[in-house]
Amino acid sequence: MINSEQLKFGTIILDNTVVIHLNGDFDSVLNLLQGQVTSDCSHISEQLGQISSLCDEKGFVLCNFEIIFDNNKWLIIIEESSKDIFLDEMSKFLPFYKVSAELLNCQVTGVTRKINEDLYSDEHVILQSDEALLTLIIKNKKQINNKLKMSDWAFNRKFLGDHQINFEEKGKYRPHELGQHITRVSFNKGCFKGQEIIARMEYLGKLKKETRLIVYSDKEEVSKYKIVGHTYQVKDRFFSSCLGNIDSFS
């Protein structure tokens, strides 16, 4: 049984992430992103970021990342292993918008807060539920008292429904298989790469598979599922994002 009591609150320095600055006029960067990524970036503000994805023309997810607007800069927060996928895909379009992509030397801190806690002025919400907020801070110089483990941060993300792919899974899954059509895709904005197929699945298709968080002690318990992204271990328990037929979870 998975419940909100398993959420861990505190902070963690995300050493496995890098920061990409999309340098250009505000509207130029916004228009660039709107035509490429799955989320609706017009809703991003100084303290409200987004989780988002890049897809190929057939609607398969290439990489996952966060988008925030910090100190008048559009920033992409992405795992080190996936940064070249993002940069290679976006480089085809940067010149048309007079935007450049630059890697910044920044520290990224992830924070899990209780829903009623106050935020720092430089904190960016990327995920939230009735129980918790997940936020990012860039160039954090504040005292970190309650450190989380990477497994805690990963569990919190999965518990809030954020099932991410890793580098090796580039182009293997569409958003609906991962639940990303709920968390990372906007169906109200204009076209983006892969949008036609993803929208067809939303409005005309019948969802047969989905991804859920499963906590288990024996790998045999999840042998009928496909594991998506990273599996983490806490003591004698594992937790994974598991993809399978919808009726197999009942």
Image: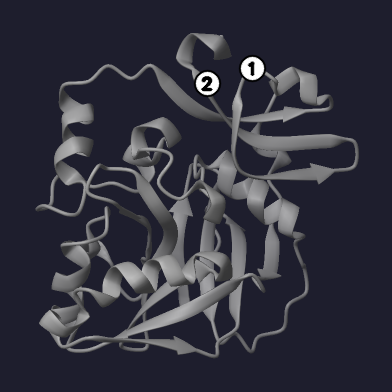
Residue 120, can we see it? no
Q: In the rendering, at what x and y percent does residue 133 appear?
A: 52, 55
Query: Which residue is under mark 1?
Result: 224
Q: In the rendering, at what x and y percent does residue 45 appear?
A: 29, 71
Residue 46, can we see it? yes
**Three-letter residue code for mark 2:** Gly
**Camera-side residue of 156 and 205:** 205
Label 2 environment density (alpha carbons within 10 Å; few <14, some 14–19, many ≥20): some
Secondary structure of the residue carrying tag 2 is: strand
Q: Quadrant of residue 22?
A: bottom left
- Name the mark on residue 187: none
**Three-letter residue code for mark 1:** Lys
CA gap, disc 2 and disc 1:
7 Å
Q: In the rendering, at what x and y percent does residue 114 appear?
A: 59, 54
Q: Is residue 58 above or below residue 93?
A: above
Task: Decide if residue 75 is on the left or right side of residue 248.
Answer: left
Question: Which residue is located at x 22 percent, y 57 percent?
Answer: 40
Question: Which residue is located at x 83 percent, y 44 percent?
Answer: 234
- Name the mark on residue 244: 2
Question: Which residue is located at x 72 percent, y 52 percent?
Answer: 152
Task: Decide if residue 94 is on the left or right side of residue 123.
Answer: left
